[in-house]
Amino acid sequence: MGRRELLHAHGTQEFTRSGPIEIPAGVSRVVARGHDQIHGYGGQAMIVTLETGETEAVQQGAELQPFDE
């Protein structure tokens, strides 16, 4: 749905600024996952329930994996 490109490294500090990403009606959960040009995808993805803000950490490894409901 969207990607937020950072212009410089942010290290281990939480990143709080972002541009808007439109989420289609009817979508109740989204996946957020870190990626950089040197290391690729991070091993952990976060599933966010939009209505409640609840998060669930899912270990993924370096390759993209599907998510089961």
Image (spheres, helix red, strand yellow):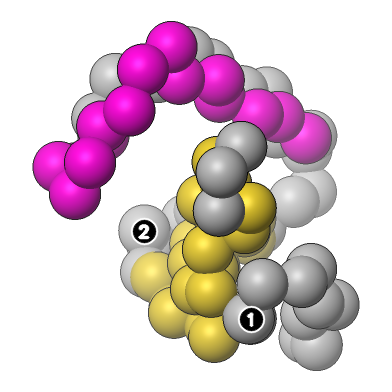
Label 1: which secondary element: loop
Quadrant in which the N terminus is drawn: top right
Quadrant in which the C terminus is drawn: bottom right
Say above or below: 22 vs 15: above
Instruction: Name the quadrant containing residue 54.
Output: bottom left
Q: Is residue 64 left or right of residue 38?
A: right
**Which residues are drawn in magenta?**
1-15
Q: Is residue 42 left or right of residue 28?
A: left
Q: In the current view of this chain or complex, which residue is farthest to the front? A: 38
Looking at this view, is 36 or 57 the one in front?
36
Please identify the dominant SS of the magenta region.
loop
Q: Position of residue 41 (x, y in %)?
A: 62, 58
Q: Position of residue 25 (x, y in %)?
A: 78, 38
Residue at image point 43% right, 12% down: 7
Calculate the distance from the C-alpha at mark 2 to the C-alpha at mark 1.
21 Å
Question: Looking at the picture, which amino acid does disc 1 mark?
Answer: Gln
Q: Position of residue 14 (x, y in %)?
A: 19, 42
Residue at image point 44% right, 79% down: 57
Say above or below: 33 vs 10: below
For disc 1, the marked residue is 60
Q: In the current view of this chain or complex, which residue is farthest to the left? A: 13
Q: Evaluate whether residue 58 shows in this view.
A: yes
